[in-house]
Image: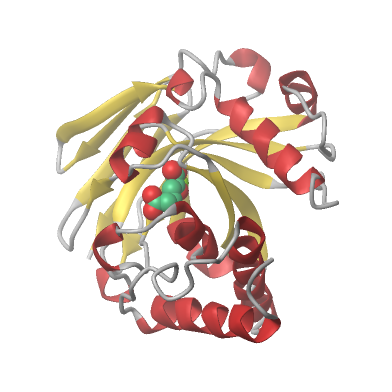
Amino acid sequence: MNLNRETILQLAAHLEGAELGVHDVLKITGDHPDMDWDDAYAIQEEIRLRKEARGNKTVGLKCGLTSFAKMKQMGVETPVFGFVSDYMARPDGGEIKTSELIHPKVEAEICIVTKAPLKGPGCHIGAVMAAIDFVLPAVEIIDSRYRDFKFDLKSVIADNTSASRFVVGGRARDADELDLRTLGVVLEKNGEVMTMAAGAAVLGHPLTAVVMLANHLGARGQEIPAGTFIMTGGVTEAIAVKAGDNVAVRFQDLGTVSMRFV
Ligand code: OOG
Ligand code: MG
């Protein structure tokens, strides 16, 4: 760690203030070029503690920048991890208020809920398969607090990986009924196909993202508890949305997740 405690707390307040106040900020590595990975995750952790102290429950974990399309879109090469809070959840088919967001984008994600704890280091895809309770589809609405979505990995980790809203829908399925690599995903906006991919777009297999998450937390002495909702990351590039847009994402074998931006 290169930043002192006071700076970590100040940056957490700065970034969460941008989220809650719906305004953008410049990437924080500009003023703090010596910030390291542990500093970045420490800032994110403080944002989580601020939300929990306010009474918001942490309701899931997210992997980000796990698909080649996302890495290419954002110009980065390493997955990142964050969390989602209760107030970020929106119902399937519901409305998302753009007045609460800076510059939202949508992405299609294959998600799991665990039934057993997962602990790294040494977590592997077999352990993840054994720990899955069910698979379900979601759309994440990301909203980087950084101006024009311009950031580097450390800045985006500190900003809780752009977490903003998420919609879980479709139908839950047993993992052994699905081939997550060939599972097709079609993202439509206003009735037009914008982009599509198969599950393998995420690190060759979406569960690889969960393996990486378990090993990332394990290196910090933490485990993923049973009953955890985990988003494995956008399968395609993210698509910008504005008020008036309708989004529907069709997941092979998992149904459709939709929402309206107002
Ligand atoms: C970072 C968050 C990425 C995903 O699924 O790839 C993410 C960003 O692109 O703003 O959630
Ligand atoms: Mg995402």
Left or right: residue 218 versus residue 57 is: right
Q: Which of 229/80 is in front?
A: 80
Left or right: residue 220 versus residue 57 is: right
Asked whether the viewer can see residue 44, the reply is: yes
Q: Is residue 24 above or below residue 251?
A: below
- Residue at x 51% of width, y 18% of height: 204
| Image quadrant where residue 99 sits | bottom left
User: Quadrant location of the N terminus?
Assistant: bottom right
Residue 45 place in picture, x, y as percent? 66, 68
Q: Is residue 107 above or below residue 220?
A: above
- Residue at x 45% of width, y 83% of height: 17
Q: Which of 162/95 is in front?
A: 162
Residue 9 place in picture, x, y as percent? 62, 83
Residue 208 place in picture, x, y as percent? 62, 27
| Image quadrant where residue 243 sits | bottom left
Asked whether the viewer can see residue 91, the reply is: no
Left or right: residue 184 versus residue 148 is: right
Residue 240 place in picture, x, y as percent? 22, 51
| Image quadrant where residue 189 sits | top left
Left or right: residue 7 versus residue 125 is: left
- Residue at x 68% of width, y 75% of height: 49
User: Quadrant location of the C terminus?
Assistant: bottom left
Q: Which of 215/198 is in front?
A: 215
* Rendering colour mode: secondary structure
- Residue at x 15% of width, y 43% of height: 190
Q: Is residue 77 above or below residue 91?
A: above
**Label total for image:** 0
